[in-house]
Amino acid sequence: MEISNLTKNRIKEYLNKGTRFDGRELTEFRDISIETGISNKAEGSARVKIGKTEVLAGVKMSISEPYADGPEDGTMMVTVELLPLSSPNYELGPPKFKAIELGRITDRGIRHSGFIDFKKLCIEEGKKVWTIFIDIYSINDNGNLVDASAIAAVAALRDAKIPVINEETGRVKFGEWTEERLPLVMEKNPINITFSKIGNSIIIDPISEEEDSAESRVSIGLITYDKKVMISSIQNGEPTEFGIDELGKIFDKAEEMYLKLGKDVNNKIEEAIKRNNKK
Amino acid sequence: MADNIYTKRLDGRKMDELRKMSAEVGVIPNADGSATFSFGSTVAIAAVYGPKPLHPQHLQNPKKGIIRCNYDLLSFSVTERKRPGPSRRSQEISRIIEWALEPVLGLDEFPGTVIDVHLMIIQADASTRCAAINAAAIALAHAGVPMKDLVSSVSIGKLDKQLVVDVSKEEEDYHEGEGATDIAMTFMSNSDKVLALQLDGKITPEGLKEAVKLGRKATKEVHNLQVKVLKEYLEKTGGGD
């Protein structure tokens, strides 16, 4: 939804003074909370809140034929649905561009991070592999669904257990799980950080009003590889003109944020899974 | 740390060498502007229709014209047939191309109108979105749409630890060492402004800064070709066709 110019101008005035409506610094995240195991029919699931923004993610798995160009590779599909229950701006109907884009950014963030070891998802070369469906739903949109979706996807993947295969039919036995977790490369610890440009300021983790005031944005997916912080995906959004130096500063900031945020998110997912195991 | 193992390009090119590029202006007589652009065997064709009145009227912007891009792969342009019709991928790339082109267009001059930019990939061998953007920029200029600059796009790859210009399909599938990183970048041709940036793979922030510089240099070659074919076309037709 378009917000009033009045609000936009006020947001810019605040940013020029280095503050925001909710008192945060320009590059400060809101509080993140993570729960796992929120739906017991799913192979894995998670609820992620960033401030008032909330998303749910669920992992379901099935057995299917691999693609021709990867006969030994499991497959993955990410979809994002923007539920009408999560905002007055969303309507029923086939996915609109925003949902498609969110799904694609989240998909690539996970896929290219190397977080999932797809080779280990092969059951029978060229014939049978695991397919992982990651479905993400918005429950309350108060900005930055993109970073929330990425965290939720990672948390749900880490929560997931591989289902039991029915030996006779060769299909999944629904409702029965092995003790085996997904083949994930934990050290990679993928995180997505989105930078929004409003006037001359660059901020992270925007609330809805800030998101609507932003002229453009760039989402950066980061991982740890070979003990170094690496950028594993980038996507910009909306018409924009970034200076080369300006981008350089964003890459550096992303690295700095990753070191902090990556650890925080990782701990929170671990705690959530531990809490869940005790239940 | 291990040494870089990608020391020779699979197709024998130099690390900073683009594939052979070609471009042609005015390839679709019905269109207001049109062009082809190819990087090696990746071939994109672009047609521009408009500025024209936008229907339904409620989509019109009374302050400025809008741009609508439609990028897609032809079903036979890839090894495994692509189901005809828009996919999630093509919808996303279409929008990214719109975003990359809009900042250079004088859309304020044409309120209530639309410029349709159709971009089809006839033959796909990596860097299809870059080829499409380069074709689109030529076609927009051919259509006479006011532009403050041309737009040029190129893909920079990182194969193991080696940066290369204009990634081919073979290179895109490289798995040795650190594997392949593909970075599609689009610049305003005559300034250092980045209009679009997409990356898949893994690269350090420092490495990425290098890659952007390399991309900036390579897009200058793209730009030279775009200007050359537009000039030749003008000389040939006198601009009136």
Image (cartoon, coloured by chain):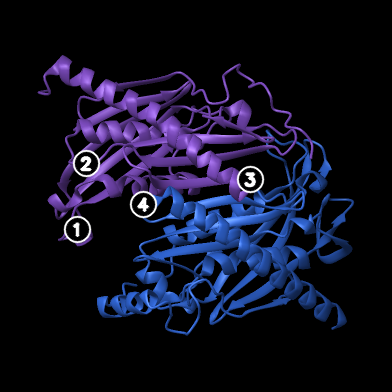
Where is residue A67 drawn, in percent x and y? 68, 38
Q: Is residue B41 left or right of residue B194?
A: right
Which is more foreground, mark 4 or mark 2?
Answer: 4
Real-space CA distance between mark 4 and mark 2, rounded to the nearest whole angstrom: 15 Å
User: Which chain's colour is blue?
Assistant: A
Q: How far separated are the C-alphas under marks 2 and 3?
A: 34 Å
- Earlier residue among tags 3 and 1: 1
- Residues flagged by tags 4 and 1 on a common chain: no
Q: Are marks 4 and 2 on the same chain?
A: no
Residue A58, given in percent of the width and then of the height, sits at 67, 67
Three-letter code, disc 3: Ile
N-terminal of the pair, mark 2 or mark 3, is 2
Q: Amino acid at mark 2?
A: Met
Residue on which the image places disc 4:
A241
Q: Nearer the viewer, residue B17 or A104?
A: B17
Residue occupied by mark 3: B203
Per the image, label 3 sits on a secondary structure element best described as strand
Residue type pointed to by label 4: Glu
Q: Which residue is mark 1?
A: B60
Q: Is residue B76 left or right of residue A214?
A: right
Front residue of this view, candidates B93 and A45: B93
Q: Nearer the viewer, residue A233 or A199?
A: A199
Q: Amino acid at mark 1?
A: Gln
